[in-house]
Amino acid sequence: MLEVSISKVKGIFAKGLCENVYIKKIVDFLGKIYDSNYFFAVAVAIAVSGFTFRFEIIAMSILLILASIGFLLIKNLTPTFLCVFLTCMVPLRFYGATAEMFLPLIIFLGIAVISMLSRMLIFPIKYRPNKLFYSQLIYSVALILGGLGYLTFKQYISLVPIYTILGLGVFQLFFLVYFSSYYKIADDKVVSDFSRMMVAIGINCLLFFLCEYLVNIPTFITDGFYLPCLQWKNNVGNVLLLAMPFCFYFIIKNKKPIINSIIVSLLLIVLFISRSRGATIFGLIVFIIGAIYTFAKVDKTTKKKFGIVLGVLLAIAIILVIIYWENILPAIQKSLADKSSGRFDIYKLGFNLFKESPIFGIGFYYLKIYDISSLGGNMTVCLFHSTFFQLIASLGLFGLISYSTVAFFKWQQALQNHTFNRVALFSLLGFALYSMINTGTVIPLPCMTIVTMITVICYKHNIYENNKNVNYFEISK
C-alpha cells in the first residue's frame, strides 16, 4: 500500500513538473541545446582542452556539471552520457595516480550521482527483468565471490578492487535497468544520436593524439614516433575500437558520407600511430569488414565518395611513410622485437593462480608476488591482459561461466539483421578481439558501460524494427 502511494506521489510530482509552463520552456530550451551538434562539439572541446593544457580537474568538473543538468532536465540521455564518458577519458595522464589527486572532484561527482538517482525518483523506472538481467545478476555474484577463501578481508575491501568488483557487476546491472527504462524505444533518432555520441568519442581520441603530437613534434619524430603519455596504446585503443565502426552507420545512411569517411579513416590511422599492435591489427580487421559491408549497402554515388576518400588518404599515408621512413623503421623494429610485452608470462601466471583457486579465483587485489618485469610497482588491481585469463584467475570457473552467459545474451542482441545492429556488432567484435590480449573488459567506465549501452539500444532497436506497424505504446512497455 505504501509503495503504491509513493508511486502515485512520484507520478504527480513528475506530472506537475512537466505541466509547469516555465519549467517546460526551460526543459525544451535545454533539450534543444543538448541535442545539437554544437553541444557535442563543446563537450569534446572541453575534454580535449583539459587534457592538452593540463587542467584536467577543471575540465572534468565542468563535464560533470553538464551531466548533472542532463540527468535532471534532459529527456535524451545520450548527450548526458557523452559528458560522463568524456569525463572518464580526460585524466589519461593520471595513470597510476593516487585517489587523493581526484579529491577536488568529489563534490561534482556527488552532485552528478545524486542527479542521476533523482531522475529515478522524479520519473520512476519501469523495467521487466529478462535473461540478460538475470545473467548479469549471476555475474555480479561471481564478482563479489571472487577471491573467496584466498584474500584477507582487508585486501578484499581495498578501494580499487572494490570499484572493479562493483563497477563490472552491480553498477552494470544498474545501468542495464537505467538504460532500459529511459530508452523506451530505439527508433532511428535514438540510434542516430547514439552513433553520433560514439563518433564524438572517437573524434575526442583523435584530437587527444593530434594535440599531443603538435605539442611534442620534435620528440615525436626523433624518438621513433612514440608518445610517452600514459597508456595511450591500451586505453585509447579500447575506446577507438568501440567508436570507430559507428562512422559506417552514417555513411550507409548517407549522412555526410565524405566527412564520416574521413573520420573513420583518421581513426584507423590513430590506431596505427598509437603503436598498439593488437589494436592496430583488430582495428584493421574491423575497418575492412565495415568497409565491405558499407560498400554493399550504399548506392553508387556514396560508393564513389567513400572510395575517393580512402584512395586520397591512402596516397597521403604512403607519401608520409616514404618521407619519414628513416624514423618509422626503428619504431617498427622495436615493436617487432618486443614479441609479447610479457603477456605470455602473465598468462602462464594466471593459469597457475587459477589452479590454486579454481572455483572462485584469487580476486582482483594486487599482491606483490604478481610482479612481472615492469608490471609491479603501483598496480592496485591484478590485470592479466586477457579476458579469458582474467576470468579464470580472478573469478575462477564460476566467473568464466557466468561472464560467458552475459556475453552470449549481449551478442545475441547485435546479431539481428538491422543496419545499426550490424555496425554495433563490428564495434563489439573489435573490442572483444582486442580484449583477448588486453584489459578492456575489466574497465567499468567508460568501456563496459558503453558495451551495456550498446546492448540495450540494440535490444530496443530490434523491437522497434520488428514492430514498426505496432502502436508505440505497445512496444515501449
Image (cartoon, rainbow, N blue to C red):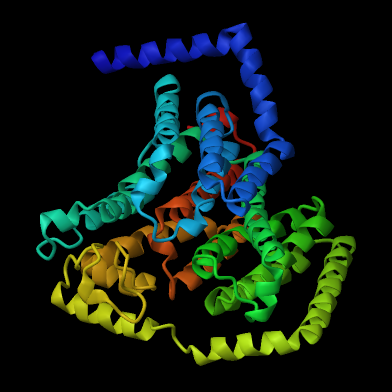
Going by the image, does 297 lie left or right of 26?
right
Residue at position x 68%, y 62% in the image: 215
Is 107 in front, or is 292? 107
- In percent of width and height, residue 117 lies at 39, 29
Residue 69: x percent and y percent?
Answer: 54, 27
Q: Quadrant of residue 289?
A: bottom right
The quadrant where residue 354 appears: bottom left
- Quick one: quadrant of the N terminus? top left
Q: Tell me if residue 204 can be seen.
A: yes
Q: Nearer the viewer, residue 11 or 209?
A: 209
From what the image shows, is residue 81 above or below residue 246? above
| Residue 278 spot, x, y in % from top left | 53, 77
Q: Residue at x 19, y 67 (%)?
A: 362
Residue 425 shows in the view: no
Q: Is residue 65 left or right of residue 192?
A: left
Relative image position of residue 380 (x, y in whole percent): 29, 62
Residue 212 vertical placement versus 369 (above, below) = above
Horizontally, residue 340 falls left or right of residue 90, namely left
Identified at 59% across, 12% down, the residue is 23
